[in-house]
Structure formats: structure tokens, C-alpha cells
């Protein structure tokens, strides 16, 4: 039995479908009861519609709950061998978060609650289950706090990257359950057939240039790694590269994967993420305002030129 968190998301639904195709029994965490809802898996489908679609698959069970609900996570993992943790925080930073007397982490949708405390719940439930042997967690590249992507995602998304990395640290610190951490590129529908591109993988928390990668491919990595014992306790960066520079599937890449051996950054990385947002955030905002002011100036001059042009 494989437990899946984030099963109604665009990544999760691909993962569940692939697990079923490979003969696994699956237990999905869902927020809403899909009874009476028409099943649908279209990109525009609601969570309840996707849950109904999942429930119709052979060998799929649903457990109602949420990543922030510790008891539902314990119920989800009971008797499971593996847990795919495919959820992510979606909360936007609010202006009130900047007020010194406001603690935004009290919001249950905050990245700290979802990407960090949620992962802690999974680890505790996995250890208590006595059966769960591995947790597969999808995060993202987050070891460079000063990159533009990190500053934007942290600044606008309640420090989502920083808390994702803190969740990674919890997994690496747990000796009782193995982990596989997947850091994909920019996930999207993309070209499901990978026309003009191929797959690349770097283990040991290695770095690859950020690139688009279909949800289907990331789901394939999460599912296929379960059949490779050497991918346990590994941190994998997954991207696409030009055709001929990589592989058509993850299988030959997973054969070469080794467990983590490097020393990963500690709590100090979180503080660097915070500093980067405090310093880099205003700088990026200033650049954006400058660009906007320049664009408005050009439009004003163009309008004046059109107004005074002789007839």
C-alpha cells in the first residue's frame, strides 16, 4: 500500500494513475468527500471532482483529512509501506504579515505549517506505523537564497522555499525511515512526449540548470524510484535537457543514483533566506517600479506625439 498526499493536485493525480498502472494499492488523502460528485481529471477540475475520479480507480482508497491534521496523517499511513508527499503551500504573503505584532505562521495555510510541520506529521506517522519504509518528498531547488526565484517565491509565498528546505532537514535527520527528496524544475503540463528534450538527474543534492519539466515526468520519478533501493536516502535534482544530452526515461538515471554523502546546510540557511528577502525583495520591487515608470513614460510620450501630429 502506498499513501499519497497531494493526490488531487496536478502532480498527485499523475502519480496515483501511474501507481495503479504498476499494480500498487493506493491510499489518498483528500480534503473533501467526493460522494455525489461527478468524476473529472481535467486541468480545471475541482479537488472534489478529482477525488471522485481517483475513487473510481481500482485499488484506490480515500482518507479524508489534511496535511495539518496530525490524526488524519496517522490514519493515512497505517499499514502503508511508502508515502509520496506531493503537496505544497499555496498561501500568498499578506501585507499584515509585515506588522510586528502579527505572527503569520499561526495561519494553518502558512508554509511553515504545510511544508515543515506537515512533513513532521508524516515522519511521526511513518515511524508510528511500523510499516512505512520510505517517504518520497517533492520540494524544489532551495539552497541558493539569493537567486531571483528564491527571493520571489519566499517573498510572495510566505517563505515557501525556506520552509521546504527545513522539511528536507527533518527527513535527513530521521534514521528510522528512509527518504527520497526530489527537486524538480518548473513543473507544468508541458510536452508530455518530451519532444526536443530529454531527462537529467543529479544525486547527492547536485545542481542542474532550471528547466521546464512535465508533471508526468516528475510523477514517474517518484513512482519508479520505489523500485530502486539505491535511491533511498538520496536528494535528486530532476530537470530536462536538450534531446540527446539526457535519457528518455528515468530508469537508466536511477540505476546510477547513490545515497547522499555530502554535508547539507543547516539552520543557518533559513536565516540567509530571510536576509535575502529583506534585502533583495525591496531591490527587486524597486527595479519593477522603475521599469513600470519607464514604460508609462514611453507611453505618455507616444500619446503626446500622436496628439500633436499635424493632420
Image (spheres, rainbow, N blue to C red):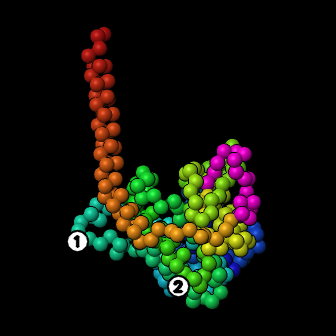
Q: Which residue is mark 2?
A: 124
Which quadrant of the view contains residue 80?
Answer: bottom right
Image coordinates of residue 99 in percent, x first then y, are 24, 66
Residue 249 colored magenta? yes
Image coordinates of residue 251 in percent, x first then y, are 74, 62
Residue at horizontal 59%, vertical 70%?
261
Q: Is residue 99 left or right of residue 233?
A: left
Q: CA distance from mark 2 to mark 1?
A: 32 Å
Please name whichever residue, 125 or 200, is drawn nearer the observer in this view of the structure.
Answer: 200
| Range covered by the magenta-colored residues | 239-256
Which quadrant of the view contains residue 53?
Answer: bottom right
Q: Residues within 10 Å of mark 1 (few under 14, many from 20)?
A: few
Image disc number at residue 101? 1
Please name whichever residue, 44 or 191, is drawn nearer the observer in this view of the structure.
Answer: 191
Local SS, label 2: helix
Q: Residues within 10 Å of mark 2 (few under 14, many from 20)?
A: some
Local SS, label 1: loop
Amino acid at each position: 500500500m502506498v499513501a499519497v498526499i497531494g493526490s488531487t493536485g496536478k502532480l498527485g493525480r499523475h502519480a496515483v494513475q501511474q501507481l495503479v498502472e504498476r499494480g500498487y494499492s493506493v491510499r489518498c488523502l483528500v480534503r473533501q468527500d467526493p460522494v455525489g460528485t461527478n468524476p473529472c481529471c481535467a486541468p480545471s477540475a475541482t479537488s472534489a471532482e478529482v477525488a471522485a475520479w481517483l475513487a473510481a480507480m481500482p485499488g484506490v482508497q480515500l482518507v479524508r483529512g489534511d496535511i495539518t491534521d496530525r490524526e488524519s496523517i496517522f490514519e493515512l499511513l497505517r499499514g502503508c509501506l511508502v508515502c509520496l508527499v506531493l503537496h505544497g503551500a499555496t498561501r500568498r504573503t499578506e501585507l499584515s504579515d509585515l506588522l510586528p505584532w502579527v505572527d503569520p505562521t499561526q495561519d494553518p495555510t502558512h508554509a511553515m505549517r504545510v511544508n515543515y510541520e506537515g512533513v513532521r506529521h508524516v515522519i511521526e506517522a511513518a515511524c508510528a506505523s511500523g510499516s512505512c519504509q520510505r517517504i518520497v518528498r517533492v520540494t524544489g531547488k532551495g539552497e541558493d537564497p539569493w537567486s531571483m526565484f528564491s527571493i520571489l517565491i519566499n517573498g510572495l509565498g510566505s517563505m515557501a522555499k525556506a520552509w521546504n528546505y527545513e522539511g528536507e532537514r527533518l527527513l535527513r535527520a530521521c534514521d528510522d525511515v528512509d527518504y527520497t527528496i526530489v527537486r524538480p524544475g518548473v513543473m507544468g503540463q508541458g510536452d508530455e512526449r518530451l519532444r526536443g528534450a530529454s531527462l537529467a538527474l543529479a544525486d547527492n543534492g547536485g545542481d542542474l540548470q532550471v528547466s521546464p519539466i512535465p508533471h508526468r515526468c516528475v510523477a514517474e520519478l517518484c513512482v519508479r524510484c520505489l523500485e530502486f533501493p539505491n535511491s533511498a536516502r538520496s536528494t535528486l535534482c530532476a530537470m530536462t535537457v536538450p534531446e540527446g544530452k539526457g535519457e528518455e526515461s528515468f530508469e537508466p538515471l536511477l540505476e546510477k543514483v547513490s545515497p547522499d554523502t555530502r554535508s547539507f546546510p543547516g539552520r543557518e540557511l533559513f536565516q540567509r533566506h530571510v536576509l535575502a528577502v529583506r534585502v533583495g525583495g525591496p531591490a527587486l520591487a524597486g527595479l519593477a517600479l522603475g521599469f513600470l515608470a519607464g514604460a508609462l513614460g514611453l507611453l505618455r510620450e507616444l500619446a503626446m506625439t500622436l496628439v500633436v501630429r499635424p493632420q
